[in-house]
Image (cartoon, rainbow, N blue to C red):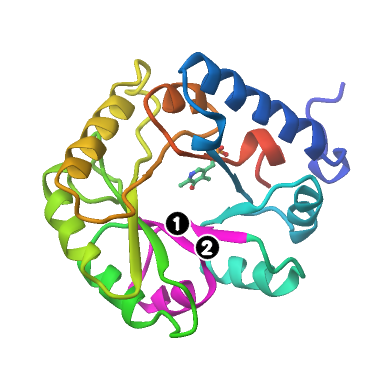
Amino acid sequence: MILAANPTNSPTPDLSSNLTKVRQRIDRQVTQSNRASETVTLLAVSKKHPVEAISQLYTLGQRDFGENYVQEALTKIAATEHKDIVWHFIGPIQSNKTRAISENFNWVHTVDRLKIAQRLSEQRPEQHPKLNVCIQVNIDHQASKSGAAPSEVESLANAVSALPNLRLRGLMVIPNPETNIDGSAFKDAHALFNQIKKNNPSPHWDTLSMGMSGDLEQAIAHGSNIVRIGTDIFGPRP
Ligand SMILES: *Cc1c(COP(=O)(O)O)cnc(C)c1O
């Protein structure tokens, strides 16, 4: 009896139909939440998947891609000929990696302390447009998670929005799915986003990055502008 498929023999996932299904889920929820469809961007999270999969999705119209590991990302960025891909860094940031991130990405979702933001700003090449950044918030107070404490976010936002080569866009969260069953962490993130917006730290404050394969509907219902989808587009990570 065959107990498990050999992963090396498994068929290439059908990226086209997966992408269509995810787009349909987004469209359905956007409609249900009475929002305009252009207010939600689909970020395809390509970590651990080959550049060929990125190229295939590119031909299907996908332009925003998310990567978590700097070295892996640099290899893929160099290997793709599509210069209009919008690259988003969504992994934890070590300070010795800020230069590579600032030189090669269009967005960074995981800024959680001022020192990292300062380095990203200082190291942004002069000829590049400002680097779009979100502040990652540990919205549900997880013990092992990165992200600024919710109580610190407003002062961090004020400091980051003053940095010359960054464009502060908003907040990013990764709630624990086991405690976010009711969507309360997304609701809290939306409230914090609106509270900071009222005090206007940045004229470009327009982005709430939240929602993954398992909870994108709930995230959109609570105001997400960028959903970060890996598994439901690319299949399971190797
Ligand atoms: C891997 C990852 C995702 C994608 O998760 P899936 O559950 O595979 O959709 C989204 N956001 C971040 C920050 C990630 O690290």
* Pointers 1 and 2 in contact (C-beta within 8 Å): yes
Q: Where is residue 194 in the image (x, y as percent from the top left)?
A: 23, 36
Instruction: Name the kind of residue labelled 1 in the image.
Output: Gly
> Quick one: quadrant of the N terminus?
top right
Q: Is residue 217 above or below residue 7?
A: above
Q: Nearer the viewer, residue 31 or 113?
A: 31
Residue at 29% across, 32% down: 190
Instruction: Name the kind of residue labelled 2 in the image.
Output: Tyr
Calculate the distance from the C-alpha at mark 1 to the C-alpha at mark 2: 6 Å
| Label 1 near ligand 1 (CB < 8 Å) | yes
Residue 72, picture quadrant: bottom right
Q: What stretch is highlighted in magenta?
A: 86-110
Tell me the number on the disc at residue 91: 1
Q: Earlier in the sequence, mark 1 or mark 2?
A: 2
Taking the image as shown, residue 20 lies to the left or right of residue 90, namely right
Q: Is mark 1 on a helix, strand or loop?
A: loop
Residue at 35% across, 41% down: 173
Q: Position of residue 193 (x, y in %)?
A: 25, 39
Residue 89: in magenta span: yes
Q: Residues within 10 Å of mark 1 (few under 14, many from 20)?
A: some
Tell me the number on the disc at residue 69: 2
What is the count of numbered marks?
Answer: 2
